[in-house]
Amino acid sequence: MKIGDQFTVEDGVVTCGFCSAELGANTENVKRNLAIEQVSVEEAGPHYEDPSRYVDQEMVFRKFYCPKCATMLTNEVARPEDPVHDEVTLLES
Ligand SMILES: [Zn+2]
Protein backbone atom coordinates (compact mmCIF):
# COMPACT_ATOMS: atom_id res chain seq x y z
CA MET A 1 0.00 0.00 0.00
CA LYS A 2 1.35 3.38 -1.00
CA ILE A 3 0.98 6.21 1.56
CA GLY A 4 1.36 9.37 -0.50
CA ASP A 5 4.67 9.48 -2.37
CA GLN A 6 6.67 9.09 0.84
CA PHE A 7 5.94 5.62 2.19
CA THR A 8 5.02 2.12 1.09
CA VAL A 9 3.80 -0.57 3.51
CA GLU A 10 4.11 -4.21 2.51
CA ASP A 11 4.23 -7.33 4.67
CA GLY A 12 4.50 -5.22 7.81
CA VAL A 13 7.53 -3.26 6.61
CA VAL A 14 7.56 0.46 5.82
CA THR A 15 9.84 1.52 2.98
CA CYS A 16 10.81 4.85 1.44
CA GLY A 17 8.56 5.67 -1.50
CA PHE A 18 11.51 7.10 -3.43
CA CYS A 19 14.35 4.58 -2.96
CA SER A 20 12.67 1.57 -1.26
CA ALA A 21 14.98 1.72 1.79
CA GLU A 22 13.51 -0.19 4.72
CA LEU A 23 12.45 2.26 7.43
CA GLY A 24 11.07 -0.12 10.06
CA ALA A 25 8.09 -2.18 11.04
CA ASN A 26 4.63 -0.74 10.54
CA THR A 27 3.99 -1.29 14.26
CA GLU A 28 6.63 1.27 15.27
CA ASN A 29 7.00 5.00 14.68
CA VAL A 30 9.26 4.97 11.62
CA LYS A 31 10.07 8.66 12.18
CA ARG A 32 12.46 7.44 14.90
CA ASN A 33 14.46 5.60 12.21
CA LEU A 34 14.82 8.63 9.93
CA ALA A 35 17.57 11.24 9.94
CA ILE A 36 16.36 14.30 11.83
CA GLU A 37 17.26 17.95 11.25
CA GLN A 38 15.89 20.38 13.83
CA VAL A 39 15.74 24.05 12.85
CA SER A 40 13.81 27.15 13.88
CA VAL A 41 10.21 27.40 12.72
CA GLU A 42 11.18 30.54 10.78
CA GLU A 43 13.47 28.38 8.61
CA ALA A 44 10.49 26.19 7.67
CA GLY A 45 9.37 28.80 5.17
CA PRO A 46 7.02 31.75 4.83
CA HIS A 47 3.90 29.59 5.08
CA TYR A 48 4.67 28.91 8.78
CA GLU A 49 3.64 31.77 11.03
CA ASP A 50 5.77 32.89 13.95
CA PRO A 51 4.77 30.46 16.75
CA SER A 52 5.13 33.17 19.40
CA ARG A 53 1.77 34.48 18.13
CA TYR A 54 0.16 31.36 19.61
CA VAL A 55 2.41 29.91 22.35
CA ASP A 56 4.86 31.25 24.93
CA GLN A 57 7.32 28.35 24.59
CA GLU A 58 10.15 27.88 22.10
CA MET A 59 9.10 25.78 19.12
CA VAL A 60 11.26 24.03 16.51
CA PHE A 61 10.68 22.58 13.06
CA ARG A 62 11.86 18.99 12.62
CA LYS A 63 12.59 17.58 9.18
CA PHE A 64 12.73 13.80 8.81
CA TYR A 65 14.86 12.42 5.97
CA CYS A 66 15.26 8.96 4.45
CA PRO A 67 18.64 7.70 5.71
CA LYS A 68 19.48 6.31 2.24
CA CYS A 69 18.31 8.85 -0.38
CA ALA A 70 18.03 11.93 1.92
CA THR A 71 14.56 12.85 0.69
CA MET A 72 12.52 14.68 3.32
CA LEU A 73 9.65 12.31 4.07
CA THR A 74 7.78 14.18 6.80
CA ASN A 75 8.08 17.02 9.31
CA GLU A 76 6.62 18.29 12.55
CA VAL A 77 6.56 21.36 14.79
CA ALA A 78 7.35 20.67 18.45
CA ARG A 79 9.00 22.01 21.56
CA PRO A 80 12.75 21.22 21.51
CA GLU A 81 12.45 18.80 24.43
CA ASP A 82 9.45 16.93 23.01
CA PRO A 83 9.92 13.33 21.88
CA VAL A 84 9.22 12.54 18.23
CA HIS A 85 5.46 12.64 17.82
CA ASP A 86 3.56 9.44 17.06
CA GLU A 87 1.20 11.08 14.64
CA VAL A 88 0.55 8.26 12.18
CA THR A 89 0.44 4.49 12.46
CA LEU A 90 0.95 2.80 9.10
CA LEU A 91 -1.02 -0.42 9.03
CA GLU A 92 -1.98 -2.56 6.10
CA SER A 93 -5.65 -3.36 5.67
ZN1 LIG B 1 14.78 6.95 0.36
Image (cartoon, helix red, strand yellow):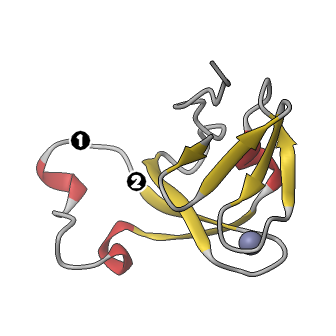
- Quadrant where ligand 1 appears: bottom right
Q: Is residue 22 above or below residue 85?
A: below
Q: The residue tagged with tag 2: helix, strand or loop?
A: loop
Residue in the image at 58% along x and 72% along y: 72
Mark 1 touching mark 2, by CB under 8 A? yes
Q: Amino acid at mark 1?
A: Val
Residue closest to the eye, 18 or 29: 18
Q: Amino acid at mark 2?
A: Met
Q: Is residue 9 above or below residue 93?
A: below
Residue in the image at 59% along x and 38% along y: 82
Residue closest to the eye, 49 or 16: 16
Q: Picture coordinates of residue 90 (x, y %)?
A: 64, 30
Assess disc 2: are there few (<14), some (14-19) or many (≥20) residues with their C-alpha within 10 Å of its C-alpha: many
Q: Picture coordinates of residue 20 (x, y %)?
A: 80, 65
Residue in the image at 15% along x and 43% along y: 54
Left or right: residue 84 versus residue 40 is right
Q: The residue tagged with tag 1: helix, strand or loop?
A: loop
Res. 59 mark? 2
How many angstroms separate mark 1 from mark 2 (CA)? 8 Å
Q: Residue furthest top?
A: 93
Res. 18 mark? none
Q: Quadrant of residue 25?
A: top right
Q: Which residue is mark 1?
A: 55
Left or right: residue 39 versus residue 65 is left
Q: Is residue 4 above or below residue 44?
A: above
Assess disc 1: are there few (<14), some (14-19) or many (≥20) residues with their C-alpha within 10 Å of its C-alpha: few
